[in-house]
Image (spheres, grey):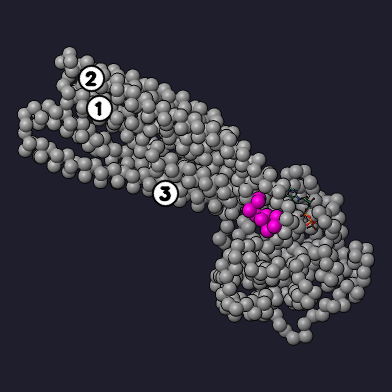
Amino acid sequence: MIKYLLPSSLLQAPPESGEASTGQTGSYATAIHTASAGAWQHVRMAAWLSLPIGLLGLLPSLFVLQVYNRVISRGGNATLIAMVAGVLVFLGIEWWLRRKRAKALREAGAEIDYHVSQALLASMLQRPLLTLEQRPASQWLQLFRDVGAMRSSISGGLAGAFMDIPMVLLALIVIGIVAWPVLPVILVAMVILGILAWWWADEVRTGRVEEIAQARALDRTTTEVCNARTTLKVLGHDQAVRQTWQTSYDQWLTESFSKNGELENAREASTMLLSFFSIAVITVGAIAINSQWMSIGSLMAVNLLASKALGPIAQLAGNWRSLARAHDATRRLQTVLQEPVEPAPQNLQLPRPQGRLRLEQVSFQYHAGHTPLEQVSLEMGPGGLHAIVGRNGAGKSTLGKLLAGLYRPTEGHLFIDEYDLAQFSRVDIGQWIGCLSQQVYWFSGPIIESLRMVNESATDAQIVAACQLSGAHSFISRLPQGYQTTLGEGGAGLSAGELRKLALAQLFLRNPSVLILDEPSSDLDFESETALLQALLKIASKHTVVVITHSVRVASVAQKIYHVCGDGQLEVGTPQQLLPKLFGVRPAQASEHTQTPASDTLQEEAA
Ligand SMILES: Nc1ncnc2c1ncn2[C@@H]1O[C@H](COP(=O)(O)OP(=O)(O)OP(=O)(O)O)[C@@H](O)[C@H]1O
């Protein structure tokens, strides 16, 4: 049955896809197929249960037939009581079987939801940063909602209607036996309802494309407005945004309203047709009774049987929309799940590198065509503080992301010690290369839990030491609940500088060989920047520290400066060589406020 509810082409395991350079193309491509195979046993169970349910569904009509033909004419009350008792018992059994069938279908839906949701989340987290950045959050949310659409097509009313189709056949057989003169009327009714259901299915399907496009546009706008709510408040010019949102909303509402209207028409028309055919059955039946071709009991029974025969077909017409939605959802999910992901973690304990980074003829080009780096070769570390500088948009963060293994070079190779980074997943690389990005996102919840998230085995002493090193300990200590303070979404409740210090503490807790920090001091006050520089200098004695910065103070204490020129080229030199040219100052002037700590405040276990 899954085959009918979901696009059958997707339920076959896709052919082995050609492996991309990452080696993991389509590793989740079979997720829907696997989930459907898992759900199949529940669906099969539901299908088997449908047979006795179908048979028991005939009982009320046979009961009516017997009451009219035997009980009323012969006045046998004892027979009636026995028959009622029997029917009640069988109704109880039918109710129990129906509950079991509904549970089996729910389990089938849950099986699909569970596996596909997990595959979707894993594939989202495991895809290269560059492709991750290309799909907005609203589209990811839509995909997770799509999983729900798949589930409800299996466990909702539509699946029940499909399961009841065998009942249609049984009902027709009984009608043929007890009331053959009305059989043609019912067959004609079935054909008309079937044609209408098919025709509406096509209507729904063709209209869905436009409706989906409008719904997506609305989702995108709504997500952006929600993300930018504080900015809008600050700027105080929400009128333009309201206008954009309203336009998008109106377009979606108009489309959805007209599609809903068509479906309502389909549903109402089905109900009216059922009533019409009921009258037609009674009329033909009455003529047949008058001609003594059948009894009144048969007519009463056939009235009940007709609803059993026509009900599932009428229900299908009303449920096409959810079938169309499930089809679209499954196709979208399948496309996304087939997209390339990064290699899976190697789970191999390799010797920890010392932290020597080497770029060999590396070029990097964005899909849009921009090439921030062209044939760049360089070496950093092991150890030491290295500053990457350059004008806005020159390509500093791009270089940082390449060094962190977040972007893969378009050409050339990148090594950490003797290892080529191309062979590792981001999870593997993450043990050795830690990265603090320009935008820090903090998860809601107690501070201590978010800190522990990055290193579950960290002791309390190590967490406190990492916070002391990053400068977070002093402000956390002043909070009434200290480390147990619960922060809101995105770290609401703390300042940008405080959040940056917390993110730094997380980075220190991971204790990587190489630390890459993208503008770590951008939100920090003068004193905090001084403290950070002292901490970084100390860490740089044992680790390779790469800082992307616009700060002349940071650049002045670096062992080497890497100037990203913006034309794809890179200039390397000491602060003495490059500071006067790039910042117009001498290193001594820039670093006069930065002294290495007199006492050893660095907690070795944290770094
Ligand atoms: N995901 C992306 N897709 C396409 N182009 C991008 C992407 N990210 C950055 N760019 C482009 O690449 C160039 C370098 O960006 P990058 O973020 O590396 O600059 P930067 O030197 O770090 O700038 P800033 O000092 O402003 O942070 C920019 O021109 C930018 O428009």
For label 1, the residue is: 303
For label 2, the residue is: 285
Report helix, strand or loop for mark 2: helix
Count every numbered label the image shows and give the total: 3
Q: Position of residue 479 (x, y in %)?
A: 62, 77
For label 3, the residue is: 110
Report helix, strand or loop for mark 3: helix
Position of 263 with respect to 493 (left or right) is: left
Q: Residue at x 34, y 36 (%)?
A: 163
Q: Are the two marked residues, 2 and 3, in contact with CB atoms closer than 8 angstroms? A: no
Residue closer to the observer: 340 or 227: 227
Q: Is residue 11 above or below residue 265?
A: below
Amino acid on which disc 2 is placed: Gly
Q: Quadrant of the C terminus?
A: bottom right
Position of 485 with respect to 30 (left or right) is: right
Q: Quadrant of the N terminus?
A: top left
Q: Residue at x 63, y 57 (%)?
A: 426
- Badge 2 or badge 3: first in the primary sequence: 3
Few, some or many residues within 10 Å of mark 2 (<14, 14–19, 20+): many
Magenta stretch, main secondary structure class: helix
Amino acid on which disc 3 is placed: Ala
Mark 2 vs mark 3: in front: 2
Q: Residue at x 50, y 32 (%)?
A: 261
